[in-house]
Image (cartoon, rainbow, N blue to C red):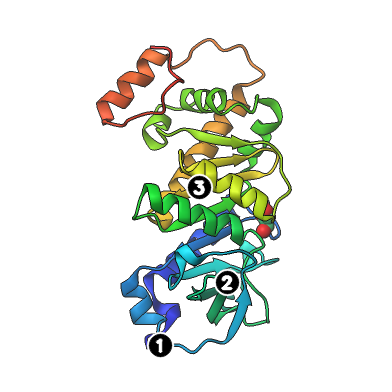
Amino acid sequence: MKKITEARFFKEFCATADNMYRLGWDERNGGNISLMLEEADADEYVKGRKTERLIPLGFDARELAGKYFMVTGTGKYFKNVKAEPEINTGIFRISADGQNAELLWGYEDGGKFTSELPAHLMSHIQRLKVDPQNRVVMHTHPTNLLAMTYVHELDTDAFTHTLWQMSTECIVVFPDGVEVLPWMLCGTNEIGEATAEKMRSARAVVWALHGLYGAGRTLDEAFGLVETVEKASQVYMLTAGLPRVNTITDEQLKMLADAFGVKYREGILKV
Ligand code: 2HA
Ligand code: ZN
């Protein structure tokens, strides 16, 4: 069995948490990442390991039975992931009955996966139905996006339209737009179900007054999505109190989508 800490997926996971921390998105224990391992990586680095502990999931994840995940730990700081990944992250298999995580590596101080695991696994289940290659779900607290949810109406179409206007690349990077959830209690199965439901129609789900969920096929893709949404939110926050003299028109947004061959969310552009 090869050393997990030398695996590319592992290094990329730790580097991603580190970048998110450095960008100021994940203060204290804010944020969490879940990566579903590719079969080849699971074979090479994980499968032969003995189960260290069984950790109850608290909901039925049968649809992901036998899948391997690397997930940040509850109460743990993104700041510390790179230096001590064996404490701040864990790798587990979903048990055959979908009720437990079979811990194979990590959470070495007796810890366990993020309290937001229901939202993560339920989102994986939904995204896999839309895109069988989806592997990553990340939750984070990007500063400007968070600020924007205090001053912008929380309607999905209006929020998406504003973000698309804030930078030319937006409609190409997230043509599905962003779904917006109202404030809800975090860490519950209810917010998990609501998030997963929204993940059917978009890879980005805003949790008003809290943060953002992003999904993707790779860590880079999910990170790039969050980064682009956050950049657009920053431009919005920098300009929100100022008279708007120029804007990207709906015709121009359509031109962009057509030029890049992306199918954008309907009902938003008036063209
Ligand atoms: O796990 O961000 O939403 C810390 C959080 C909870
Ligand atoms: Zn959070």
Cα–Cα gap, marks 3 and 1: 31 Å
The answer to whether the residue labelled 3 contacts the one labelled 1, judged by CB atoms less than 8 Å apart, is no
The reply to whether residue 216 is visible in this rendering is no
Residue drawn at (68%, 36%) of the image: 182
Q: State the image quarter where residue 240 is shown.
A: top right
The earlier-in-sequence mark between 3 and 1 is 1
**Callout 3: SS:** strand
Q: State the image quarter where residue 56 is shown.
A: bottom right
- Residue under label 1, please give it: 48
Q: Nearer the viewer, residue 187 or 95?
A: 95
Q: Position of residue 133 (x, y in %)?
A: 34, 55
- Residue under label 2, please give it: 99
137 with respect to 29 (left or right)? left
- Residue under label 3, please give it: 214
Q: Position of residue 271 (x, y in %)?
A: 38, 12
119 with respect to 27 (left or right)? left
Residue drawn at (59%, 54%) of the image: 119
Residue drawn at (60%, 59%) of the image: 118
Mark 1 is on which residue type? Gly
Mark 3 is on which residue type? Gly
Mark 2 is on which residue type? Gln
Q: State the image quarter where residue 83 is shown.
A: bottom right
The earlier-in-sequence mark between 2 and 1 is 1
Quarter of the figure that contains the N terminus: bottom left
